[in-house]
Amino acid sequence: MGYETDLKLFIDGVWKGSDTGHTVVNPVDASAIAEVPYATKADLDEALAASERAWPEWRATDVEKRGATLHKAAALLRERADLIAATLTQEQGKILAEAKAEVLGSAQLFDWYAEDAKRDYGRTLVRPAGQLSRVIRQPVGPVATFTPWNFPIYLLAKKVSAALAAGCTVISRPPHETPGCTTELFRALADAGIPNGVAQLVHGDADLVSRTLIASRVIRKVSFTGSTGVGKHLMKLCADSMTRVTMELGGHAPVLIFDDCDLEKTLDMVVPQKFRNAGQVCVSPTRFYVQRGIYDAFIKGFAERTAKVKIGNGLDDGTKMGPLANARRPDAIETLVQDAKAKGARVLAGGERGDKGFFFQPTLLADVPNEAEIMNEEPFGPVAVSRPFDTFDEVIEQANRLPYGLAAFAFTENGRRTNLIGDLVESGMVGINTFAISVADAPFGGVKDSGFGSEGGKEGLESYQVVKAIHQA
Ligand code: NAD
């Protein structure tokens, strides 16, 4: 399927090239597939000026009209889903079915926020007759977004759809691994008639783009998804300009498997979920704590299913897992697996990298000690780690032992235990007998080192608004 190699920046309604850039590679075999132009300082200044110019008119645009533009963009994403999904697979490696689901999920976000923004009511306070005090929310202003390569369209759509619906203008810097598919999101907005300067795309050097945008007084809000380290760095830059932030950072999701779960059904759910997007998911189920009585049966069933996961080119029928997204990932996973083995972990499936491209085998490690780096550092790859537990209190302590707190999962049929897990686990999202935690109408975000602020749901819209209290006597 065709891959658009003529990539451009989208600034003030104009598609433009640049003299500098970066080579985009296909992670299946590391072959070059395109050159992405990098924004210069002058391009960024132009984008900032356009964003500031466009904001007053966009915020004053009737919410119905803003919504209609977003609905149109959603329809175009659906119409072009096959082409965009193929581009995503070639740039990032995930299998075509997952890529298409990502595009359709992104369209749903635009539809959802187009409607949600219409129901933003504010409130009035109780006052004596003749007086009025009201609380309103207003768009925060021009927004800068920085998004990663694991769900390059969906994570970008989460930010852009909510910000535009709230009445903000947006400048987005997508990751350099996936410029083609992210460009398609802006093409859909452009073709839907988004006014010049309202939604702009600046590929480029991450440091230059983030420093320039954040230092500018034009940008009133930064929304970042990525690693905790880069998140902390961007927060420091934002402190100097008192810029608001939403930080969607790493995770290390615990999965609590109790002996009353339906074992076969649970295994059929958790194994494909672990290897979805080759494990490069911030809410990927990672630390499997299994009640001792079913531990052996669980890891045996997990290993058998893992060995059957077919890896290959995500464009090919039958492939269940593609390569990792960039050369850094197999290197990092190999180091973590070697370290765990040296510290006593058993490799029950996989454990090796591929001989070409950025592949790493779907891997299960058992009896992994807490001292192993992989029990502490987000693996962000196709590796599940497991260990047995005995008591409820013990497993809650293990689940909460890391500085991360993004998602947690549990499999049990016990209702009282379910309630307790919901209360006691330190995370922004909890899935009990389900992995469906990233949906348009619910907040998604972390606690502790996993960041703060929510995307999705009403909370996602509010993150692009400021609150004002107006009192009248
Ligand atoms: P990274 O931290 O270098 O980059 C993460 C993202 O931030 C990338 O898209 C990158 O382009 C961008 N980025 C990097 N430096 C930046 C800067 N100065 N300003 C603005 N944006 C910047 O990580 P990586 O090597 O791409 O991935 C390593 C780790 O990051 C993973 O192991 C995982 O823990 C984490 N990660 C998390 C998510 C998530 O969804 N939360 C996504 C991708 C990566």
Image (cartoon, helix red, strand yellow):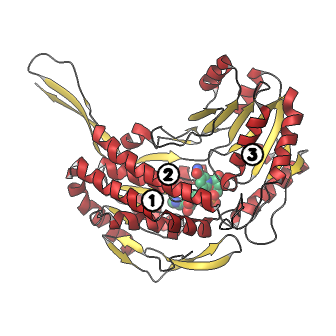
Q: Secondary structure at mark 1?
A: helix
Q: Do we see residue 156 in this rendering?
A: yes
Position of residue 323 in the picture relative to residue 223 (left or right): right
Identity of the amino acid at label 3? Val
Look at the image and tell me in which quarter the C terminus lies: top left
Q: In front: mark 1 or mark 3?
A: 1
Q: Secondary structure at mark 2?
A: helix
Q: In front: mark 2 or mark 1?
A: 1
Mark 2 within 8 Å of ligand 1, using the beta carbon: no
Q: Are marks 2 and 1 in contact (CB under 8 Å)?
A: no
Q: Above or below — where is 258 with respect to 354?
A: above
Give the image location of residue 6, x and y in percent.
47, 80
Q: Are marks 2 and 3 in contact (CB under 8 Å)?
A: no
- Displayed quadrant of residue 35: bottom right
Give the image location of residue 454, x and y in percent.
47, 41
- As drawn, the label of residue 105 is 2
- The residue under label 3 is 271
Separation (CA) of disc 1 from disc 3: 29 Å
Give the image location of residue 295, x and y in percent.
86, 33
Q: Earlier in the sequence, mark 2 or mark 1?
A: 1
Position of residue 230 in the picture relative to residue 409 (left or right): left
Position of residue 253 in the picture relative to residue 394 (left or right): left
Q: Foreground: 291 or 207?
A: 291
Mark 1 within 8 Å of ligand 1, using the beta carbon: no
Q: Foreground: 234 or 259?
A: 259
Q: Above or below — where is 320 with respect to 91?
A: above
- As drawn, the label of residue 78 is 1
Q: Are marks 1 and 3 in contact (CB under 8 Å)?
A: no
- At horizontal 54% and vertical 43% (from top left) the residue drawn is 438
Q: Secondary structure at mark 3?
A: helix
Q: Alpha-carbon neighbours of circle 2 within 10 Å: few (<14), some, or many (≥20)?
A: many
